[in-house]
Image (spheres, rainbow, N blue to C red):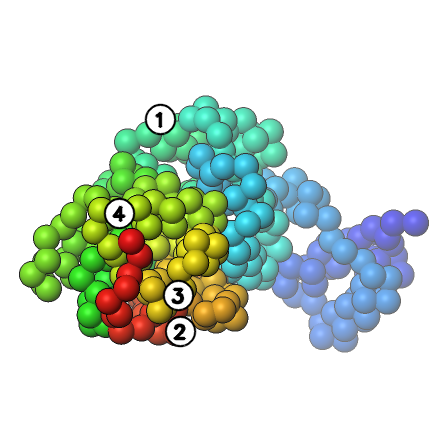
Amino acid sequence: MKITIKDIAKEAGVSVATVSNVLNGTGRVSEETAKRIRRIIEERNYVPSTLARGLKNKNTQLISVIVPYLKKGDFEENPFFWQLVSGVEMGTKDQAFNVMLTRVDRDDDLSFVKRHNVDGLIVVGINADSALYQNILDLKIPTVFMDSYIEQPGIYQVHNDDLLGGYLGTKHLLSQGHDRIVLVMGRLADRGVEYQRLLGYKKALAEAGLAYDTHLVMENGGSMLGGYHAAQRITVLPEKATAAFVLSDIGAMGLIKGLNEMGKKVPEDISVVGYDDIFYTEYMIPSLTTIRQDIFKKGMMAAGLLLAQINGEPVPEQSIFLPVELKVRASTAKRLEKGCE
């Protein structure tokens, strides 16, 4: 039989309001009474209903992390999203919010927000010129945009120093003597994180006196399969490349697999740098040199900004900018003359 708050109140010999105060940390309850109530709650394995709380405070205790236009299956293959949602969950656990990860296929596919009465949104990697962006604003609910670089006042945002990340990865390869560095990315048209990383790539090349070569920039390589296919494209370049900077660790994993199948060794034939530092890059063979961003912390920061909006609390800054760093491992080495050709 399901235990209710009324059952707890009856056994403790107090009112329902007193039990509610103990659960929520509100009101005045003697320490002796609070201990008795908490003991009964633990013995009966009572779990408060988030729905009941929502009816009282007008919230459903539900937030959604939205990833626009992500292909089916990309959630499952990319630990980036697992770490991100874990950070969001940690950032909301004190207020007992539930987190829902949602893939949005179309600009108008936001019916779930009203259907579930979602309290707030964390939107990952959206283009401010898209119809979906405007549709999200039209919902008029608390929202935090992540990895989006939106130039509009009043928008809550969290992102990393992606330009620096692009610069550091390229600079590292240049320092190893590589001067033909392939950049494997998602879509060049997107003006978010990958565009910022591309700017960092260009900056490092310019400092080294090297011209930016569009033939060395390969799109649609952000997924594991995309990186895998990029390996073949690299090996048929007119001029050999000795290094590749992949703007996601998942893409780098696919690239290394593809190179290995074509008889190319990493880093002997080609050095590879990834981006993100997802939790198992250190255990790959070879371990992956990558640009580390604190994905978990980014999720926590976004959750904090969102809860502040939901609860009507002030925040010191609406835009949070997190640092990145280079993690050098075994997938990069000094240039050898062979390369990929």
Please name whichever residue, 300 or 235, is drawn nearer the observer in this view of the structure.
Answer: 235
Q: Position of residue 209 (x, y in %)?
A: 7, 61
Q: Residue under circle 3?
A: 266
Helix, strand or loop at disc 1?
A: helix
Exactly how many numbered labels are in the figure? 4
Mark 2 is surrounded, within 10 Å at the Cα level, by few (under 14), some (14 to 19) or many (20 or more) other residues, namely: some
Helix, strand or loop at disc 2?
A: loop
N-term-proximal mark, 4 vs 3: 4
Please, what is the three-letter code of the amino acid marked with disc 4? Leu
Q: Position of residue 146 (x, y in %)?
A: 38, 49
Query: Quadrant of residue 297 in the image?
Result: bottom left
Query: Which residue: 29% across, 53% down?
Result: 341
Mark 1 is surrounded, within 10 Å at the Cα level, by few (under 14), some (14 to 19) or many (20 or more) other residues, namely: few
Q: Residue under circle 4?
A: 237
The correct choice, above or below, for 166 with respect to 220 in the image is below
N-term-proximal mark, 1 vs 2: 1
The correct choice, above or below, for 223 with respect to 34 in the image is above
N-term-proximal mark, 4 vs 1: 1
In the rendered structure, find residue 330 and report the number of the disc placed on it.
Answer: 2
Please, what is the three-letter code of the amino acid marked with disc 1? Ala
Please name whichever residue, 263 or 259, is drawn nearer the observer in this view of the structure.
Answer: 263
Q: Position of residue 46 (x, y in %)?
A: 80, 58
Q: Residue furthest right?
A: 1
Tell me how far mark 4 sits from mark 2, CA to CA.
Answer: 25 Å
